[in-house]
Image (tube, rainbow, N blue to C red):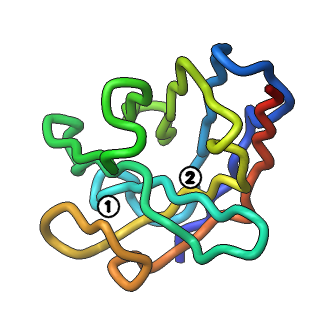
Amino acid sequence: QVQLVESGGGLVQAGGSLRLSCAASGRTFRNYAMGWFRQAPGKEREFVATINWSGAGTYYADSVKGRFTISRDNVKNTVYLQMNSLKPEDTAIYYCAASARAGLAATVEGYDYWGQGTQVTVSS
């Protein structure tokens, strides 16, 4: 089992920045690729970004490319999502997830463990 706890969400004005953190415990963190997803009210959960076990490989949704950066610290067992130039349409609950599969998954089905989520609200 892997336990994931997100933090860092909040209310920010459009154009602002937030950094989300996801602390992992349980099995060896470096064995997992990590991802961020988000879910807005009335919408399905959607992929945001993913990073491989070493941090050398990343992949982003087109909607956040160039604005968001995913990174990880395998000593602190933590994955981060730096979000810049935030837009009202970025408002959602953000979830981190861990995948034991090879490669970089961009679908909900590609992940094995999920956190409880953290709310991000961007005002216009």
Q: Quadrant of residue 44?
A: bottom right
Label 1 SS: loop
Label 2 SS: strand
Q: Where is residue 1 in the image (x, y as percent from the top left)?
A: 53, 77
Q: Which mark is residue 32?
A: 1
Q: Do the residues labelled 1 and 2 touch (CB within 8 Å)?
A: yes
Spatial CA distance of label 1 from label 2 is 10 Å
Q: Mark 2: few, some, or many residues within 10 Å (few <14, many ≥20)? A: many
Q: Quadrant of residue 25?
A: bottom right
Q: Residue 24 carries which label?
A: 2
Q: Residue at x 51, y 25 (%)?
A: 82
Tell me the kind of residue under disc 2: Ala
Q: Which of 90/72 is in front? A: 90
Q: In which quarter of the image is residue 93?
A: bottom right
Q: Where is residue 35 in the image (x, y as percent from the top left)?
A: 41, 56
Q: Residue at x 72, y 45 (%)?
A: 91
Q: Which residue is drawn at 49% across and 66% down?
A: 46
Tell me the kind of residue under disc 1: Tyr
Q: Which of 121/31 is in front? A: 121
